[in-house]
Amino acid sequence: MPAHEGHHRSYDAVIVGGGHNGLVAAAYLARAGRSVLVLERLGNTGGAAVSTRPFAGVDARLSRYSYLVSLLPKKIVRDLGLDFRIRTRNVSSYTPVERDGRPTGLLVGGGERRTREAFARLTGGEREYQAWQRFYDMTGRVAQRVFPTLTEPLPTRDELRLRVDDEEAWRVLFEEPIGAAVEDRFADDLVRGVVLTDALIGTFADAHDPSLKQNRCFLYHVIGGGTGAWDVPVGGMGALTDALATAARDAGAVLATGHEAVRIDTDGSAAEITYRTADGEGTVAARHVLVNASPQQLAVLTGDQPPTPAEGAQLKVNMLVKRLPRLRDSEVDPREAFSGTFHIAEGYQELATAHAEAAAGRLPTAPPSEIYCHSLTDATILGPDLVEQGYQTLTLFGLHTPARLFDRDNDAVREELLKSTLAQLDAHLAEPLADCLATDADGRPCIEAKTPLDLERDLRLPGGNIFHRELSWPYAQEGTGRWGVETRHANVLLCGAGAVRGGGVSGVPGHNAAMAVLEEPGD
């Protein structure tokens, strides 16, 4: 919507930032009868959870940044009456590899029998499949017990441990580097790599990093919905934020786009927010301020010392193809291989080598990445003509590319990395990906790449980190507060991904910040 010029001078709550978490908070508070103003810097709400048409003259609406849904609780969808749907993927993943001079791979999904046969085809026996089943049965039990706590007040560490009620699972996930569990349970290098990837999405770490930041990343990737499933948002990720914006507006919240908050002054009980528009500056008063931005931006707004940014480490690539490329592994249909997560150069040793090279300041020789095709599960993001002609979208997420690697020349390094990343994919294709790429209205290939520095510039993600900071354990620690959204200012809450239990498209920090406001005495 255009910048709103008719908002009041004072509100019960002002929300800084109109990303999905800010919209969740706005909808909850407005539905509870609070007066709410959302100040959004950009000309549209949605933040990183948006759908756009990135290719000139092409009717393809892609989830440009965030793209799959797992951590969004059904409770939020129900509570807010959202017109939003997801679809499950029949195939979980496909990982190509060359063994004994022949192309093969591991297809996970399509039913238990097919998965078991795929493991046997790759490994020559039953052992790895049985280990896989035992391992993910364990993580599934943890997911069922931990996921519901995300929208409750923070449990203590001991309380969460009692809730998990499985000492082996607690040790594997919460106490020892995840690499130990992977190496202890699996023997095949490729299987080990597929398991480990969930610990490395947007997280630059070795499997044995003593900080356990890889464990925290892994945990959030396997607990979503109580199952760990990653689903496709129907209509693209923008469908979620559009539904949230509608819910907030319908409940009475005012969404003011083109309004950039530049300062928060507070005495702990009342606050004044200074904002900037194309026409100048203004101020608005509030009882509560909820900041849907990074901890660094929060500190800038309140005049506090900003924390050190956590470095981002990913390459995001959006593509449109005229047809899916054929695979060297002729036993797998590309429509199945690309409908799940297509792992590239993600064997266990390949991941370790890529991390070591990047840690030494070099681009990985074989950059690891993963791809999926949204349009195979949900074709609504493509115009009818593109669907009829067989066009498809491809979304690639590259790992182990920390922001520091791009400092010398972001544009040149981006192109170098994109070229080598696609070369790793081409090694498993029966035809070059370039032959399959569609072209836009100007005749250019339909492909765009974003580095951590691009995300920092475009979305104000400190260090380009997609989680705003390193992910936290989902339990209370010193200074986390009751809901994990509290700050040192009593009436200023952090409702973005940098809150405890933040990260990913979840709405959890927005929900929790709203609950913190609503349970205050007198509110």
Image (cartoon, rainbow, N blue to C red):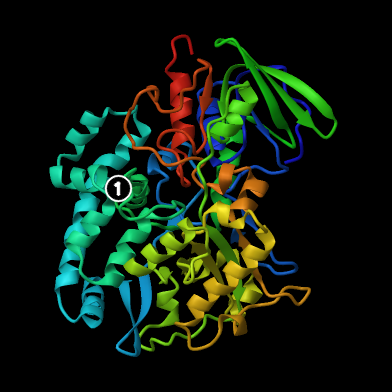
Residue closer to the observer: 376 or 42: 42
Q: Kindly identify the residue that appears in the image at 36 percent across and 51 percent down.
A: 221
Residue 183 visible (yes or no): yes
Residue closer to the observer: 131 or 417: 417
Quadrant of image for the N terminus:
top right
**Is residue 69 placed above or below 25 in the rendered structure?**
below
Q: Position of residue 54 (x, y in %)?
A: 68, 62
**Is residue 299 placed above or below 97 in the rendered structure?**
above
Residue at the front extreme? 360
Residue closer to the observer: 201 or 229: 201
Q: Quadrant of residue 210?
A: top left
Q: How many numbered discs? A: 1
Which residue does the numbered mark 1 point to in the structure image? 226
Q: Kindly identify the residue that appears in the image at 40 percent across and 46 percent down.
A: 71
Q: Position of residue 218 (x, y in %)?
A: 34, 51
- Residue type at mark 1 is Gly
Q: Kindly identify the residue that appears in the image at 25 percent across and 47 percent down.
A: 173
Q: Position of residue 424 (x, y in %)?
A: 49, 76
Q: Secondary structure at mark 1?
A: helix
**Is residue 389 placed above or below 12 in the rendered structure?**
below
Residue 252 visible (yes or no): no
Q: Quadrant of residue 439?
A: bottom right
Q: Position of residue 403 (x, y in %)?
A: 56, 52
> Dot 1, how many residues are within 10 Å of its Cα: few (below 14), some (14-19), or many (20+)?
many
Q: Is residue 292 left or right of residue 195?
A: right
Q: Kindly identify the residue that appears in the image at 45 percent across and 56 percent down.
A: 86
**Is residue 255 placed above or below 106 in the rendered structure?**
above
Q: Quadrant of residue 179?
A: bottom left
